[in-house]
Image (cartoon, rainbow, N blue to C red):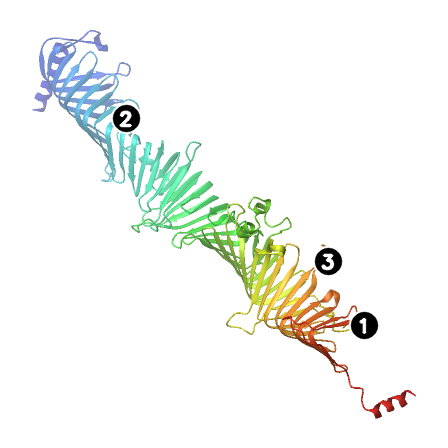
Amino acid sequence: MRKIFRATLLKASVFLAASIFVSEAGAAGRGFTMLPGTVKNFELPNFNEKSGWKEWELFGDSAEYIDDSRVDVKGLLLKLYEGSNVLKAEIKSDSAVLNPSTKKVESGAKIFVEGNGFYLEGRGWNWNGPAKTTRVLNDVRARFSRPDKEAKPSDKTEVESAEASISYGGNTNKFSFEKDVVVKGDDLHVECDAIRIDAEKGGSGSSPVNEIEAEGNVLMRREGIEAHAGIASIWPSKDYALLTRKPSLTDLKSKATLAGDKIEIWKGSGKIVASSSKEARALAVFQHSDPQEGRVSIVADKIDMLGGGNKDSVFNFVGNVKIITSDFAASCDKLKAVAKSGSGKPELISIEGEGNVKFTNSSGDAKSDFLKVYPSRSEVELFGNASLEDGKSGMKVRSHKVVFERASDKGRALSREGDRSSFVITTIPETASAEALDDLDLKNSKVRKQGSGKGDMGTLIKSRRIDFSRSGEKLSAVFKEDVSVKSSSANALCDELEVFAVGDENIGTSVRKITARGDVRMSNEGYFASSKIAEIYPKVGVEGRGGKRELRRYIEMYAPENSPDSRPSVTLPPVGNIGLNSADEISKDSSPTVITSDRQYLSSSGDGTDRYFFEGNVEVRGSGLNADCDKIEVVMKSISSRSKKRISQIAMSGEVKMEQGLKRAECDRADIFPDAQMVVMRGNAFVFNKEDNTRVAGPRLTYNAGTRRISMEQSDLEGAVSRPTIVLPSFGTAKDIRDKRKEKE
C-alpha cells in the first residue's frame, strides 16, 4: 500500500508540474505559466537558486485554476525548510488562494503554524514566499515552549493578539503581535499594543524565547511586581528585563513604586534598578498605613531594590538623594529604605541616609552626617555633627544627635551618651518682643528688624539635652543637665532651663521668658545670684522716667513651694560704710554684700542701671553690715562706660534693723547711699551706739560719715511732726568727778 500511495503522490506531483505549472526558464524555475485543469493531492517544492536546497514545499488536497494570478487550494500544507533541507515549520489551513507568479498565499480561513519551539493559530492570513513572512489577521494565539525532554510546564509562553506576523528568515524566527496583545507565562504577564518576540529556531536554548520587546501602554506583571512602560525589553534566557519610556514599577509586597529614565529587572537575583537621566530622575514612592507617615517620595541618581519570597524589600539610593514627605524634606549622598513584605498593609520599617545630610521641617533646617527615619515611631533622627537652625527664631543648635517627633511637632537634641566632653550648644539671638516694640512705638524702626541693640551678642547655652516643641508661632525649648548660659545680660548655671519664644513677622521670633530650675547660679558684672527657681524676661516694655516707655530685662527668683527654706540670694559688690560710722572709723571689711529673701526681682534698663528688689524676711550681710527688713530695693550703676557697676543706693523698708561697726539702728525705712557714705532713716528711727550707750531717736535721722554730720528732723514718713531726742552718756556722781580731776592733776 505504501508503494502504491507514494507512486500515486509522485504521479500527482509530476502531473501538477507538467499540466498546471509549466516552467518558462527551465530548471531555474523563475516563472510559471498556468494550464487549465484541477489536481488533487498535489505537491509543489521551491529550491534556493544558489544552494539548490529546498526552501519550502506546498501541499494541497486539491488545487483549482481561476486565472493566471489565482489558484484556489483546499487542505493546504506548507512546509518551511532551513539550511540543508531541515524542516523548521509547517503551515496548515483548510483553504487558501495561491498566486503562482508572486509565490504568495492569502486566506480568510483559520491557520495553524507549528515549528520547533512554537505553535501559532489564527484566522485570516497571508504568506509571502520571497520575503519568508506569514501574517495572521485575526484571533491570534501562540505558544512558545522547549521541545526537548527536559522541558517543564513552566518553560512555556503564550501570546494572544488581534494580529501577528512571522518572519523566518535569518538566524531566528521573529514574531510580531499587534493590537490587544497579552503574553502569559509561568511568572510573566504582559499587556501592550504591540510585541516582538525573537525565538531561536528549533527552541533548543534554555528558554523557548530569546527576546521579547513590548511597546505601547505596556503592563507587565512578574514575580511580585507590576510595571508600566512605553517599551519593555525582556530576555528570558538571561532572566533580565529593561523598561524604558517613562517606566514605573510597583513592588506588590511592599506597595512601593519605582520610576525613572529606565528600570532594569533581574528575575534570578530579585534585583531591580531604576536609573536617572537629564530628563527623568529615579523615584521611589512608599505608602505607609500610618496616616501621619502617609506618602514618602525619594529621588536619586540610581535606586536598587532587593527582595524576594518573604524577605522585606530593601531599597538603596545613590547620588543626590532627596526625601520628600508631607512634613519634612531631606537630602543626602546615599540612603537605604526597608519596606515590610507580606503584612497586608504597606509599612515602611526604616530609612537610613548618610553623607551631607540636610533636613528641613517646621522646626528649621538641620544638617548631620547620618539620618534615620523610624516610621513606626514617627521619628526622624539626625546624628554625627548634627546642627539645627530655626529660621523663625534664629535659634541654632549643635549636638551629636537631633530627633524630631513628627506627629507632635516636637523634638530633642542630645549629646553623645557617656561622653562627658559632649554638649549640646545652642545660640539664641536677643530680640525685643513685638509688644515691647509696640510700646516703644518702634514698628518702623531698625530696632524691629535688628533687635534691641548693636551690642547684643545673643545667648549661648550648653547642656546635655534639649527638648523643643512648636505650636504655630510659639516655640518652647527645655535645656537639661549641666546647663550653662552666657549672654550679654547674664551668665548662669542650672539643672534645667526653659525658653519660651513667640514669632513676629516683622522681627522674627523673640524670646519672651526663660525659666531656670534646680541650683540656679547667675552672674553678671557686679553681682552673683543663687536660687532654686529663676524666671528671666529678656526684653519687656515698661514705663520709665517721665512716662516714657523703655525696654528692660526682668529677673525673678524664688524658692519652690515644696522647699521654702531654699531661699534665693544675691551677692553684690561691697556696700562699704553706709554712714553710721565716722570717716576715720570705716570698717576694713570689704566683703561682698549678700542679700537673701523669699523672693527677688531684677530689672535692667537700657541706660545700664540695674534694680534689685527683695521681698520677705530679707537679710543683708557683708562689709560689716548686718541688716534685716521686709523689702529692699538696690540700685546698681556704673560711673562711666568703662567702669564696673557698683551699688549706688539701697532702699530698705518694713521693720528695718541695721548694724554696722558699733552702731545699731531701727526704722520703718532706710535709704543708703554708699558713694556718699550716708544713710537716711525715716519712721520711728532709732540709733544706738554700743561704745558709749548713746541713743538717738526721731522721725527722720541722717548719718553722713563723709561730712561727719548727723541730721535730725521732726517730719516722719506720714508727714506727722514729732521732736527728735538724744540720750547722752551719764557724767557720774560728784565724787566720781573729783576723783577724775585728781587723776589728771
Say if mark 1 contacts mark 2, CB within 8 Å. Answer: no
Callout 1: few (<14), some (14-19), or many (20+) C-alpha neighbours within 10 Å?
A: few
Residue 369 picture location, percent across and down: 52, 48
Residue identifier under label 2: 174
Residue beneath disc 1: 584
Give, as a three-letter code, the residue at label 2: Lys
Q: Compared to 243, does 608 lie above or below?
A: below
Which sits earlier in the primary sequence, circle 1 or circle 2?
Answer: 2
577 relative to 397 in the view: left or right: right
Query: Identity of the amino acid at label 1?
Result: Asp
**Disc 1 element:** helix
Whole-percent x, y for residue 293 in the image: 38, 49
Q: Position of residue 29 (x, y in %)?
A: 22, 11
**Quarter assignment of residue 662:** bottom right
The quadrant where residue 40 appears = top left
Query: Marks 3/1: CA distance?
Result: 25 Å
Residue denoted by label 3: 639
Above or below 383: residue 167: above
**Marks 1/2: CA–CA distance:** 122 Å
Q: Amino acid at mark 3?
A: Ile
Q: Is residue 588 visible?
A: no
Position of 319 with respect to 236 (left or right) is right
